[in-house]
Amino acid sequence: MAELAYKKAGAYLIPDLMLDGENEMEELPLGKYGMLRDTFLRENHRTTYMSWTLQGTLQAHLREVDQRAQEEVDQMVAEMMKRDGVDEELKARDPMAWVQKVNALTAQAEEVVLGEIVYK
């Protein structure tokens, strides 16, 4: 039988319990898309949210969604920049126009990714 470790909180001893792999997950902050997915599940799919939380699989799911969504946005923005001629030459010639175009392309890519990955 495994021995429990306790931590002292005021006058109380509280069991120091962790789920498997919990330490590694706490070290990495959850990104934008993972947090949006968390909110979406909590507000729209409470049963799934609670089930995954109790099973200890919610954080892994949120991190996977976050990573996949970020990769998809990055890939889409790169493709659209190439297609629209938003390159280093434009950046050097007119930095403000370059920023405006990159922001517009990022917004377009995020709209697609939010619908297909985060809010699905």
Image (spheres, helix red, strand yellow):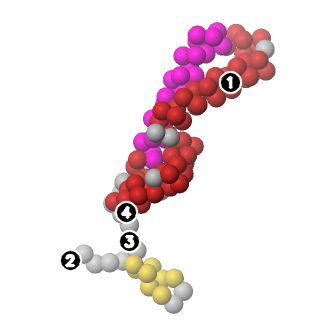
Query: Does the residue at mark 3 contact the one at mark 1 (Cβ under 8 Å)?
Result: no
Marks 2 and 3, the one that precedes in the sequence: 2
Q: Which residue is mark 3?
A: 17
Residue 26 x %, y %: 47, 56
Q: How far is disc 4 from disc 2 in space, using C-alphas?
A: 23 Å
User: Looking at the image, which residue is at 45% across and 47% down?
Assistant: 62
**Eye-nearest disc, 4 or 2:** 4
Marks 3 and 1, the one that precedes in the sequence: 3
Left or right side of 41 for 20: left
Left or right side of 57 for 115: right
Q: Is residue 60 above or below residue 68?
A: below
Q: How far is disc 2 from disc 3 in space, using C-alphas?
A: 15 Å
Residue 110 x %, y %: 58, 31
From the viewer's side, name the closer residue of 7 and 62.
Answer: 62
Query: Does the residue at mark 4 contact the one at mark 3 (Cβ under 8 Å)?
Result: no
Q: Which residue is mark 2?
A: 1
Residue 69 x %, y %: 49, 35
Residue 15 seen anywhere in this rendered image of the structure: yes
- Count the marks: 4
User: Looking at the image, which residue is at 74% across and 22% down?
Assistant: 100
Kind of residue at badge 3:
Leu
User: Looking at the image, which residue is at 20% across and 77% down?
Assistant: 1
Residue 82 among magenta residues: yes
Marks 4 and 1, the one that precedes in the sequence: 4
Q: Which mark is residue 54?
A: 4
Kind of residue at badge 1:
Ala
Kind of residue at badge 2:
Met
Q: Which residue is mark 1?
A: 104
Farthest residue in the bottom direction? 11
